[in-house]
Image (tube, rainbow, N blue to C red):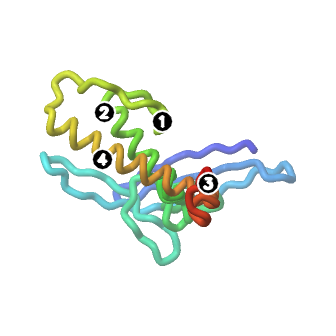
Amino acid sequence: MLASIRVFAESDRVILNYRHLRGDGEWEDKNYPVRLDWTNCNFGGKRVWFLCPGQNCGRRVAILYGGGIFVCRHCRWLAYPSQREVDYDQATRRADKIRKKLGWQQGIFNPPGCEKPRGMHWNTFSRLVARHDAYAKEALDEMARRFGLFKDIMEKGPSRRD
């Protein structure tokens, strides 16, 4: 698909001129007026925001998403990747974030590092290791439950040799 967009600025709005090549080979032009709003910044100046032109929306947003009309992520029903994560993915991501802080190799199946990063307090190191271990355990427990691992052991109990 061939398309282009031009922006025309006015004092209280911008007009998005979207031009695209339709399936029949004809060019189609669409104009989308988008109102603007300003907020004061903490250290002076102002920040400009789009007011979502979606029906009954009007949210103050920094980004508009195209596709038919230009609207905010809420009107487009878009989710952040973390909102689509299953429980064990979230716990794994959090454990990996801590592993990065500690200078360890990413991945909960990799062995933990053995040294405290230089300049890090022992209390901070101990707290991060404990939090990492809790997230890793949560992820592994959820994976085992989700994939039915160890299910037979849980139901039957440990096997005994005679």
Q: Which residue is mark 3?
A: 149
Q: As displayed, is residue 24 above or below residue 116? A: below
| Distance from Cα at disc 2 to Cα at disc 1 | 13 Å
Kind of residue sitting beneath label 1: Gly
* Residue density around tag 3, few if under 14, some if 14–19, many if 20 or more, within 10 Å: few
The tag earlier along the polypeptide, 2 or 1, is 2
Residue at image coords 87%, 53%: 24
Residue at image coords 59%, 46%: 5
The tag earlier along the polypeptide, 2 or 3, is 2
| Distance from Cα at disc 2 to Cα at disc 4 | 12 Å
Task: Give yes or no for contact between labels 2 and 1 (Cβ–Cβ under 8 Å).
Answer: no
The tag earlier along the polypeptide, 2 or 4, is 2
Kind of residue sitting beneath label 2: Lys
Give the x, y percent position of residue 73.
50, 60
Which quadrant of the view contains residue 3?
top right
Which of these two is toward me, 134 or 154?
Answer: 154
| Distance from Cα at disc 4 to Cα at disc 1 | 15 Å
| Distance from Cα at disc 4 to Cα at disc 3 | 24 Å
Q: Which residue is mark 4?
A: 131
Kind of residue sitting beneath label 3: Leu
* Residue density around tag 1, few if under 14, some if 14–19, many if 20 or more, within 10 Å: some
Q: As displayed, is residue 111 above or below residue 26? A: above
The tag earlier along the polypeptide, 4 or 3, is 4
Nearer mark to the viewer, of 3 and 1:
3
Nearer mark to the viewer, of 2 and 1:
1
Give the x, y percent position of residue 33.
50, 61
Task: Give yes or no for contact between labels 4 and 3 (Cβ–Cβ under 8 Å).
Answer: no
The tag earlier along the polypeptide, 3 or 1, is 1
Give the x, y percent position of residue 104.
37, 28
Which quadrant of the view contains residue 133?
top left
Residue at image coords 14%, 50%: 42
